[in-house]
Amino acid sequence: MSRPHALRGLLPALRPHRRTVARTIVACLVDQAALVALVTLLAHTVGRAVAAGAAPGPGTVGALAGLVLLRSVATWRQMDLSHDLAYRVLAELRVRIYDGLARSAPARVAGRRSGDLAATAMNDIEALEFFYAHTTAHLLASGLVLASGTAVLAVLDPWLTLAVLPAAAALLAHPLLGDRARAARGQQVRAATARLSADAVDTVDGMREPLARDAIDLRRRRLVDVGRGLARAQRAEARHDGAFTAVQDVLVVSALIAVVAVVAGNAVRAPAALALAVAILAPVAASADALRQAGSLRASAVRVRAATTAPPTAPPPARPRPLPDGPLGVRLRGVHFSYGGAPVLRGLDLTVPPGRTVALVGASGAGKTTLAHLLARFWDPTEGSVELTTGDGAVDLRDLPDGDLRSAVALVGQDAALFHGTLRDNLRLAAPGADDALLDRVAERCGVDRIAAALPDGPDSVVGERGATLSGGQRARVALARALLAEPRVLVLDEATAHVDTVGDAELARLLAGRDATTIVIAHRPATIRRADHIAVLENGRIIQEGTWDALTAAPGPLTRLLDPAPGTP
Ligand SMILES: Nc1ncnc2c1ncn2[C@@H]1O[C@H](COP(=O)(O)OP(=O)(O)OP(=O)(O)O)[C@@H](O)[C@H]1O
């Protein structure tokens, strides 16, 4: 979507709230009309009192009191309605941003910084509050007030219309001048805010590691630079906003001088005409200001739209095929994959029969994690197919309903994400319905009961953000227990036990061997590889060697080279 249309793209979010939008417009209209009537009647009354010595009658006093009351209620109502509308729409947009990320995770999240995503979810959304609360209904209402107010002026004296209308037109045209430059300045502020947010999150994240003094200074200098960049962008925006307001003031004052020139000879009419002109021009000036601000919101609108409308990287199947019960195997046929650059997988074939454990081995960067992610359908292959084999056929992952795939295949990575919450909550994440007995059994088998016993509140202890209060090996055990609790039929372990000590690794391997599930283990540790039924070596995007440990280590070959690199090999 082009930038000029970015704000129009925000309007569909109002569709489910048509009634509230209509009520907000009515409240705005009543609010502004009451103000115009009140100011005009008040000025007229004062003019008559001063010029003709006529005291206001009870009818006039009653009308003035009624208008004050109406204006107060209408102001409260329109503020209440417009903010209620805006905050509802913003809450829905936030959920849509989350859904957009979930649809594309981790593919799209992988390339972006979490602070940048947080800036879209928080700052850009917050910036749009102004658009939803103060732009749409107010523009319509002030347009109507302008039309009816100038009609009244024309009845009073056609020259009055001529005094006010050019200024009103100039006020409304003013935001259109320099619109592109304003949008560019808005874009710079939003981009600088996102950069600062991303850097701040990175820095706080980095503080988990004991950074060297120089590294801390470097991060600090970077934060200062990025902060200065944001301040520069904000200052440029504020400078132009100030100039904009000054031009607006000049336009309003010149219109008022023209009104005074027209009605100067009529002491009774002059105050009312002047008050009416002010009451008409004030909402027009406010609308022009809203248009100005809306222009600089385009960058936020573009970022929010991009986040909410991103198509899924693994689209749902057009005609889903449910997964039959029973054991599952895995089959990859002619799989090609690239992240957009050089190909990572180039025609990879691999078959894992149901119930077997296959170790996937390869040099760093060979594409093992990529293959694991294709098995969990984070991405689809660019060519070829990834299938789950059943007793009587095979189902392509692209044809599986998402729920079937997630319950059949579990992936445990080296740095499985734990959330700020209790140990028990973290275990239940993949299987919220698991009962306590099953949870205790799995926890005991994975050694998580021993971890819980050492924590102050046992399984109800809070493990901190990303499980920061646990060791790497403990986090690995929790992640494995969490996956097993969901009882997947295919388990993919991507260096899941790399942080676990050798004894623990053997203990977990025994536990996994006792299961019927198909297991694909990505590992560098010889003892882990050796325990697999079958070993597949990945190189140059293909499986170049397959067989049992005994067969593959009987003579020098790709596996032995990986296990025992020649001296001097990094
Ligand atoms: N999200 C991504 N975007 C772009 N390129 C990526 C992404 N993830 C991985 N790559 C690239 O794909 C190639 C394969 O990476 P992958 O993580 O699959 O290797 P690996 O065999 O698991 O390595 P290791 O043993 O070090 O974990 C690498 O060149 C890597 O730089």
Image (cartoon, grey):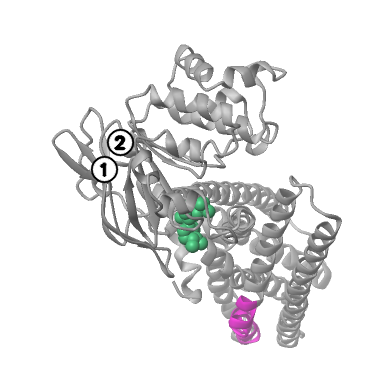
Check residue 453 for magenta coloring. Answer: no
On screen, 61 above or below 235?
A: above
Residue under the image location 54 percent in, 42 percent down: 414
Residue under the image location 35 percent in, 33 percent down: 407
Residue 431 shows in the view: no
Magenta stretch, residue numbers:
161-184
Total labels: the figure holds 2
Image coords of residue 554 (percent x, y): 37, 44
Image coords of residue 179 (percent x, y): 60, 81
Residue under the image location 68 percent in, 75 percent down: 277
Mark number, residue 404: 2
Check residue 165 for magenta coloring. Answer: yes
Residue contact between numbered discs 2 and 1, judged by CB atoms under 8 Å: yes
Residue 181 in the figure: left or right of residue 482: right
The residue to which callout 1 is attached is 400
Residue under the image location 38 percent in, 49 percent down: 555
Answer yes or no: disc 2 within 8 Å of ligand 1.
no
The CA distance from mark 2 to mark 1 is 6 Å
Element carrying mark 1: loop
